[in-house]
Amino acid sequence: MSQVGFIRSKQEIKFLILYIAERLIAPVPFEGIQELAMCDPAVDFFDFSECLSYLVDTGHMTYSQDGLYEITEKGMQNGRACAEEIPYSVRLNAEKLTEAYNQRIKRQKQVQSFIRQGKNGTFRVMLCFNDDDGTPFWNMELCVPDEDKAKALVKRFQNGPEKLYGELIELLFK
């Protein structure tokens, strides 16, 4: 364990992981929890990995077949009881990073796109723009002649579905 930072033990790393996991709005991959737990420079990869594995083994976290981690009720209870053991500045930083990560999760659920190869060598691009509840505002399927054009459509859609939706509505009402 590194001596730079506020986290001083593997026990505190476990508390930090539970603290973060309780605030996540959806199950996340290893890299997601790792990114958030590294909010303190004293947390190193190997200690983090060992602590996360321990939390799964003890039933504080689950690991799904999809490779996602999620806190359990047991983890929530124990995490709440031990939250004060995490240094205040680390908790604040973890909350800030977790909030931003949750925004990315929400955005991924709101803006979805898929590419699949169609018949005759064409590509089908499915674009979906949902509200916070998952109800679609806009679903569109387009056929394009090649994969590069399909990827370009997806990229443009991912970067600004609100603008495209507005332009489409404006065009349709003209």
Image (spheres, rainbow, N blue to C red):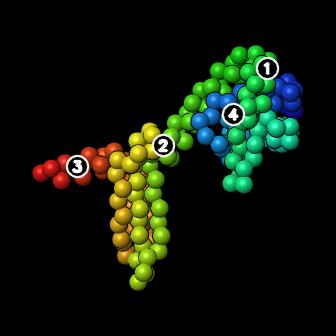
Front residue of 107 and 39: 107
Near mark 4 (Cα within 10 A), the count class, few <14, some 14-19 or many ≥20, is: many
Image quadrant assignment for residue 153: bottom left
Rendered position, 130 above or below 37: below
Q: Which mark is residue 169?
A: 3
Q: CA distance from mark 3 to mark 4?
A: 39 Å
Alpha carbon of mark 4 to alpha carbon of mark 1: how far?
A: 13 Å
- Amino acid type of disc 1? Cys
Q: Position of residue 40 (x, y in %)?
A: 73, 28
Vertical position of residue 105 compared to residue 88: above or below: below
Q: Position of residue 81 (x, y in %)?
A: 78, 19
Q: Is residue 144 visible?
A: yes
The residue that disc 2 covers is 107
**Mark 1 neighbour density, 10 Å: few (under 14) some (14–19) many (20 or more):** some
Residue 7, position as x, y percentages in the image: 80, 24
Image point (43%, 76%), residue name: 118
Q: Which residue is mark 1?
A: 82
| Of pointers 4 and 1, the one earlier in the residue sequence | 4
Residue 48 visible at all: no
* Left or right: residue 165 compared with residue 23: left
